[in-house]
Image (cartoon, rainbow, N blue to C red):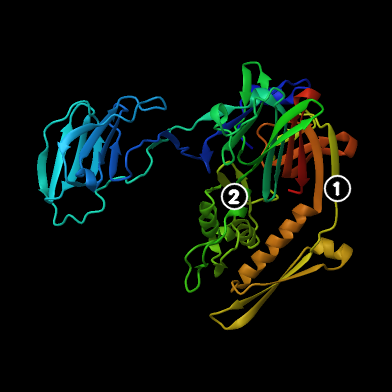
Amino acid sequence: MRQLSSTLLAAQRQGATFPCIKVEAVTKIAGVIRYDWSRLYTGSEDDYFHALTMPGDGSLVRARVTLPADSRKLYRQRVANPGTGSDFSQWTYTSQYNAVVAAAASLGAEVSICWVNSSREVRRIKSTDYGASWGSPELIDYSPTTAIYGLAAAYKPGGVWRAPLAASSLELTADIISIRQELGKASGNLTVELRNDDGRYESPGQGDLATLDTGCQLEFSPGYKTSTGSEYSTGPNFCLESMEHTSSGGRASLVLYARDGWGALGDWKARHQFRWNKTSDEMSVRDIIAVILARAGLKLEVKSQSSVITGFYPDFTVNPDDSGREVILKLLSFVPDVLFIEGNKAYIVNPLSSDSSEYSYGVEHRIQEGRYRWGALGTNRVQVEGYDTSAGHLILADSFAWGEIERLYDRLNQVEDGNINTVAEAQQRGQAILRQMEIEATDGMILIPVNCGQQLYDVIDVSDARAGLDAVKKRVLGMVLVYQPQRGEYFQRLELGAV
C-alpha cells in the first residue's frame, strides 16, 4: 500500500468525505520526457551543408555553405532569442569561400565555426561572447583529402527545429465529467471524460492543447479534502491510447482512453529469437523478467520475492513475434510470485499466507457493499515431470491438497517441463500451482469509499458483521475506481481472494 499522510488517512475513513482528484497530461513516454519538435522556420536557402549550436546564453548560432555554383561561400548567423517570431533569414558573409563542409560547437560563451576548404585547410573562426562578435579565421590543420561528406555537421533540409528539455503538462481536473480506473492481474485502464460543451477540447494535440495528444502520459492522483487542504496520493500513470468526441442532446465531451504498462508489454513484439540458460546458468526467472520489462520501458522492483524466482534458471526461448505480455505471464507461471505495474515500474510480490494485513475495512473505513465466496480448488493435486540431465532419468513429483482431496477426490493437473531437473524444483512448481489455486478459490468483492493508497496484492482485513466476518484477512486481486462528481459518486470496488 502506498504511504499516506495521517490527515489523508483520516479523511478517507470519515463517513462524510469530500473527494478531490488530479489528472494531468504530461509529455512523457515510459516516464521519460518526450521531445515534441516544432518547426521554427522554413527558409529559402538552398539545401546544402549546415551546422548549428546553442551557446550558454540560449542564443542560436548557425553556419551554412552555399552551393558550388555560388563558390561555396561560408555564412554565419546569430539569433539572440530563438522563437516562433524570430527572424532566421539574416546571414553575415564571413568572406570565406570554397568551403567543403562546416561544423559548429560551443561551450559557455565560446563558440567556434570550423570548416574545410578546397585547399584541404581546416580553419576556424571563434567568438568569446556567445557569437555576437568574431575573430579572424585561423588555420588549425590540414585534411588529407577534400572528399569529406561530414564534419560533425548537421545536414538538414528545410530549416530550424527545437524541443523543450522539460516536460510540459496540462491539468484536466476542472473539466472532468467522470473517471473509471480498472486494474487487474495483467491489465490496467483509465477512462477520463472531459466536458466539451463550449468546444474547449475541440482540437486536442494542437495549440494550447498540444500536450494532450496520443502517446502522452496521463497522471491520475486520487485524494480528499483534509484538515490541511487538498491532499493526493500519487497514483499510477497511463499512456493515452485514443480519444473520442461525443455529442448528444446538447451535451458534448472528449473521452480519453489510456492503458498502463501491460498495454506496452502487449505492444512489444520480439524482433528476433532470444534464448537464455541453454548450456549454463546465465539468468534467473527474475532476471529474464527484468530484461523483457526493460524492452517495453518498464523497470523491475522487488517488494518481496521467493527463492524460486531468483534460483530457477530455465532454458527459456522467446521466439520472433512473441509479445512481452505473453512472455511475462509464461515466466510467472514458473514461480509463486506475482507482478503488478504502477506507472513505469513493475513490482514483484511473493504472496504468503503469513503476510500481515496492511489496512482494515468495516470498522473505521466503512464497507458499503460486500460479497464473499469460497469454493473448491480447481486443482488439488499437481504432478510435475522433469528430467535429471546429470543422471539421465525422469523426475516425477506429486503435490497434494489433502483436505480438498478428501472432500472432492483428486483434481489433477499434470505439468511437464524439461527445465526441471531436481525433485526439489518439481515440488516447488507443484506447490506454486496449488498456492495459486488456493488464492483463487476464495473470491469476493467489497464496495468502499476510495482508499487512495490501495495497491494490487495488498493484504487487508475485512470486518462485516452481516456476513459473519471479523478482521478476516483477504488479498486484493483487482480494483475499479469510479469518480462521477455530478452524481456525487467516488467509490472503489476491490476484488478479493484468499491470503
User: Is 376 on the left or on the right of 127, as rendered?
Assistant: right
Q: In the figure, 379 relative to 477: above or below? A: below
Q: Does residue 392 show up? A: yes
Residue corresponding to mark 2: 264
Where residue 99 appears, as percent x and y from the top left, is 18, 45
Q: In the figure, 493 relative to 268: above or below? A: above
Q: Nearer the viewer, residue 79 or 209?
A: 79
Check the image and name the residue furthest to the bottom. Answer: 392
Q: Which quarter of the picture shows residue 407? A: bottom right
Q: Nearer the viewer, residue 340 or 24?
A: 24
Where residue 236 appears, as percent x and y from the top left, is 61, 38
CA gap, disc 1 to disc 2? 34 Å
SS of the residue at dot 1? strand
Q: Nearer the viewer, residue 10 or 117?
A: 117
User: Is 401 on the left or on the right of 335, as rendered?
Assistant: right
User: Is 251 on the left or on the right of 274, as rendered?
Assistant: right
Q: Residue at x 66, y 65 (%)?
A: 429
Give the number of callouts. Answer: 2
Q: Which mark is residue 373?
A: 1
Where residue 288 appears, as percent x and y from the top left, is 53, 60
Q: Earlier in the sequence, mark 1 or mark 2?
A: 2
Where residue 120 appears, as percent x and y from the top left, is 13, 51
Q: Quadrant of the N terminus?
A: top right
Q: Amino acid at mark 2?
A: Ala
Task: Choose mark 1 or mark 2, whichever is in front.
Answer: 2
